[in-house]
Image (cartoon, helix red, strand yellow):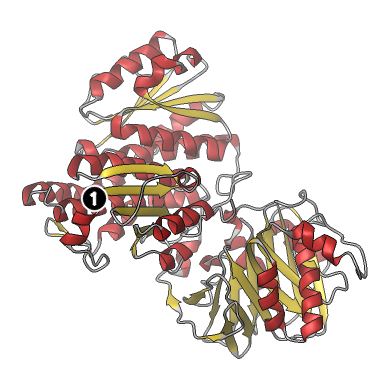
Amino acid sequence: MCGIVGYIGGRNVKDVLINGMRSLEYRGYDSAGVALMDAPELHIVKGVGKVADLERILEDHPVSGSQGIGHTRWATHGGVTEVNAHPHSDLSSSLVLVHNGIVENYREIRRELAEGACGDYKSETDTEVVAELLSRLYSARGCMVEALVELYARLSGSFALVIMAREAPGKIYCLRKGSPLVVGTSPKGETLCASDVPAILPYTQDVVYLDDGDIAELSSEGILFWNASGEMLEKIPTHIDWDVTMVDKGGYPHFMLKEINEQGAVLRNSMAKRLAEGTVDLSAELPWTKKDVASWKRLHIVACGTSYYAALVAERFLETITDFDIRVDVASEYRYRNIPLGPDTLAVFVSQSGETADTLAAERIAREKGARCLAVTNVIGSTIAREVHDVLQLKAGPEIGVAATKTFMGQMAVLYLLAIHLAKMQGKLTPEQEKKYCDELTALPYKLESVLLRQESLQETAMLYNEARDFLFLGRGISYPVALEGALKLKEISYVHAEAYAAGEMKHGPIALLDPRVPVVVISPKDGLHEKTFSNILEAKARKSPVIAIATEGDDSLDGTADHIFFVPETLDQFTPFLTVAPLQLFSYFFARFLGCHIDQPRNLAKSVTVE
């Protein structure tokens, strides 16, 4: 939600900002703007629409400067208008700032600032009020760091702020609470800041993730840091092992299609140095002893959205090979429930970005109650990775498409490795069982890639149903979370109504929806629940609903029953989600593409939800 970029250096500042904002479009936004400083002048240009629209405005109204900040806005306070777009200045136009997050007490501050106001607010945003408060604090103290220390104490909510002031040329200031902010320097004497790494990856791979309360001062000499009390800090950079080519489309029409096709590599990367010669070893990342594991009676997995569905898949595997009391919950519910947890609990928090507001809040509650906290995340320097006791990184590389695909695959892989590791430490897994699972995990990338080579039939099926406006997705057992994920993908990027149900629930209500206008997508691998699922297919056909089935190669039981069948290679029953989810991702992609939807940037959605 919202994207921030800041730059000081010798390049064309406007181009750096525009390119950085483009790389953050996946976060979701409705307007964009930049502010450039050509000391002592501040130039602000902004507008409603995409970054490409802003670029056209800049061609008609060129601005220049030696430093600048840019912003893509996802509306929270105030509608989608040019006036509400960022950057915002104070009432006297002496400083300008951009903001990601929500300031909860801005109304009280606005009333407080009414006395002595030197003009009228132009926008409906909380951000403009923050700019005016900071301007007055800076004017009173004459030191931006001192002003930011007081500002941090005065503001309630979640925010990342990046500021330029007329009286502080050559400097950009950053302040973070809750909303992510990363800074870095390049070997060419450039300093940068952004909401996420892709915006600055073309210039540096060594970055510092700001913690809550951190203040950063960027200049051509480098970056200085202070904490919320105004004490200077030393911050150690994190090296990001991503290549700049990972954040371009690589010849694909959309990032989503590129990322779907990268999933074989994601599986290999997830298992590298963790699985070898028929055994799983996570000891280099998880310094747990058998005594530690024996002390944990409960296992909680907490996540949001697609990450939650990956957790539901892993739950079904975990319950077959471990004896934990397992609970999987969405973070926005978990954080508000009185759930028993404490030192006897291993709490696993799954978040692609590591910045999801609800997941972070849930993790803080669990840690405060004494649970052992583990993060499964794609970003090693993220907030959640820095706060928990232990981290398992996905190693999926940057995911630009808003609809998660390859990170879902990576999350399942890492959680399965964790399950095997825990089962071994509990003494619940024989070497023979472990080898069987490891051999199949090793084979999965090749089987998945064979699925991805057969996209044409899914494209044809999507075209046949592109007039449908309601879909049902069904699955049983470990295929139920896959149905949930398939329905989510379709509605996220095509805006078509899709619901998923445990197939056994059809008779308890959803069957009333069935008719020839409602296609039913059934995840039906040849597993122990196959016959039960087959009965649901017959129910759908009896109501004349078209059936699209995902089935196992060699299974001819659906011939003449399902209207369309996509076959995936045979695998162990517990591992079918790795193969059955890819056809659903591709079907959703092609369906949305036929409708002409904005696949990488769906309406109303953000890649990382950093506010509640």
Near mark 1 (Cα within 10 A), the count class, few <14, some 14-19 or many ≥20, is many
Task: Report which quarter residue 526 is drawn in.
Answer: top left
Task: Report which quarter residue 69 is drawn in.
Answer: bottom right
Report x, y in % for residue 415.
30, 51
Is 503 rendered above or below residue 419? above
Q: Looking at the image, which residue is at 37% across and 46% down?
A: 340
Q: Say what secondary structure mark 1 lies in.
A: helix
Report x, y in % for residue 352.
44, 55
Q: Nearer the viewer, residue 207 or 405?
A: 207
Report x, y in % for residue 416.
26, 49
Q: Residue furthest bottom?
A: 221
Provide the residue designation for mark 1: 419
Please state, as top left, top right, bottom left or bottom right, where the N terminus lies in the image. bottom right
Q: Nearer the viewer, residue 436 or 209?
A: 209
Task: Report which quarter residue 90 is drawn in.
Answer: bottom right
Q: Is residue 394 left or right of residue 131?
A: left
Q: Looking at the image, which residue is at 70% across and 58% down?
A: 52
Q: Looking at the image, which residue is at 40% across and 48% down?
A: 302
